[in-house]
Image (cartoon, rainbow, N blue to C red):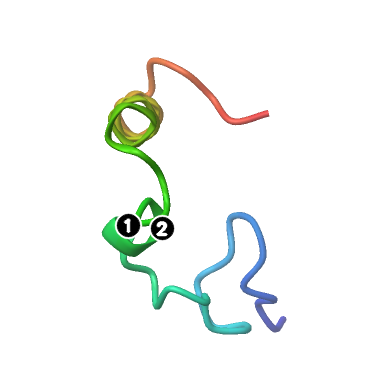
Amino acid sequence: MANSGGPGGGGRGQPQKDGGNRENMFSNLDEETRAKAQEIMEKERAGTITRE
């Protein structure tokens, strides 16, 4: 079965606009918002919060 690269995909679908680089994903945010977003991403990776 082909992987679409969508949520939970293996990245074999369409390439991400930022090439998968997390720093580029936050590049247009101000410093305070960027820090909050990165904190949320770290919590998600740690499993303390889930994406819904």
From the top left corner, tell me how far across and down residue 7 is, in percent: 64, 56
- Kindly indicate whether the residue at mark 2 contacts the one at mark 1 (C-beta within 8 angstroms): yes
Residue at mark 2: 25
Does residue 30 lie above or below 28 as drawn? Answer: above
Mark 1–mark 2 Cα distance, whole angstroms, equals 5 Å
From the top left corner, tell me how far across and down residue 14 is, in percent: 62, 84
Does residue 42 lie above or below 48 as drawn? Answer: below
Q: Which residue corresponds to the image point at 38% horizontal and 23% vertical from the top-left?
A: 47
Q: Amino acid at mark 2?
A: Met
Residue at mark 1: 22
From the top left corner, tell me how far across and down residue 36 is, in percent: 35, 25
- Residue situated in front as seen by the camera: 41 or 47: 41
Mark 1, secondary structure of its residue = helix
Q: Which residue corresponds to the image point at 27% horizontal and 57% vertical from the top-left?
A: 23
**Residue 33: which quarter of the image?**
top left
From the top left corner, tell me how far across and down residue 29 is, in percent: 40, 44
- Residue situated in front as seen by the camera: 19 or 35: 35
Mark 2, secondary structure of its residue = helix
Disc 2 residue crowd, few under 14, some 14–19, many 20+, Cα 10 Å: some
**Residue 25: which quarter of the image?**
bottom left
Q: Amino acid at mark 1?
A: Arg
Disc 1 residue crowd, few under 14, some 14–19, many 20+, Cα 10 Å: few
Q: Which residue corresponds to the image point at 35% horizontal and 56% vertical from the top-left?
A: 27
Does residue 44 lie above or below 7 as drawn? Answer: above
For this orientation, the residue located farthest to the front is 30
